[in-house]
Amino acid sequence: MPGNTASHQLSEPEPLASYCEGVTVQLCTDPDEAVAGIADGSTILVGGFGMAGMPVTLIDALIRQGAGDLTIVSNNAGNGDTGLAALLAKRRVRRVVCSFPRQSDSYVFDELYRSGSVELEVVPQGTLAERMRAAGAGIGAFYCPTGVGTLLAEGKETRVIDGRTYVLEYPIHGDVALIGAYRADRMGNLVYRKTARNFGPVMATAATLVVAQVREVVETGGIDPETVVTPSIYVDRVLEVADA
């Protein structure tokens, strides 16, 4: 307008630190602090493909913490006598939801299952990932063709869509997710390393409390934003374990 001399120049961007105010991620210095408050009867999503990406230090802390009657959702049902196998051996787990319960070194789970000491729900691997992704995305249920005509579909609703039969699957929500990542910044943004990434990103979206075990924590801004896989909004606690 005539006579209007107001400037419309863009203002200088605020310092990065100003964007970090109010960030609530807890940087834990002790594994026991990282798992504090996990209740009996919780559903816990545990990352890992075998031992790749498994947050063993967090699981060991959970054993010391003492929570029991747990439902564990993971790809496997424990390897050898460490990680999930150690938790199972302490008889803290009531139910396991996984894709591969039996391997050459799953003797702890095998013994518990054969004795009726633990329940098992087998879920195809892709369906397992999608059920957790659905929880994080707010999807009420979805139709999937995997498992149709097998024991895994017994008792489930089915529907024919464009001539193909699908089974209705429901989301898997976790009270807690224990995941392993490669690096975090002080805001809680996460990046992973190769196949150790596996279920970590979807689990982080599907749980109420997310605890990440990482190899190193860097200053905010030390991770290229374009490489962040799990944004800090999903992460509640971070534990640095340099030799993990």
Image (cartoon, rainbow, N blue to C red):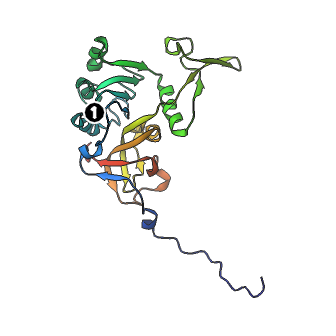
Looking at the rendering, which quadrant does residue 158 occupy?
top right
Looking at the rendering, which quadrant does residue 174 occupy?
top left
Looking at the rendering, which quadrant does residue 149 occupy?
top right
Quarter of the picture holding the C terminus: top left
x and y percentages locating residue 167 in the rendered image: 58, 19
x and y percentages locating residue 39 in the rendered image: 32, 36
Circle 1 sits on which residue? 67
Determine the residue positioned at 47% across, 27% down. 128
In the image, residue 38 sits, relative to residue 225, either above or below, namely above
Determine the residue positioned at 59% across, 18% down. 157
View extreme (front): residue: 40
x and y percentages locating residue 23 in the rendered image: 41, 57
Residue situated in front as seen by the camera: 230 or 89: 89
Determine the residue positioned at 35% across, 37% down. 53
Residue situated in front as seen by the camera: 227 or 101: 101
In the image, residue 115 sits, relative to residue 60, either above or below, namely above
Determine the residue positioned at 51% across, 26% down. 127
x and y percentages locating residue 102 in the rendered image: 35, 18
In the image, residue 233 sits, relative to residue 154, either above or below, namely below
Query: Three-letter amino acid code at disc 1?
Result: Ala
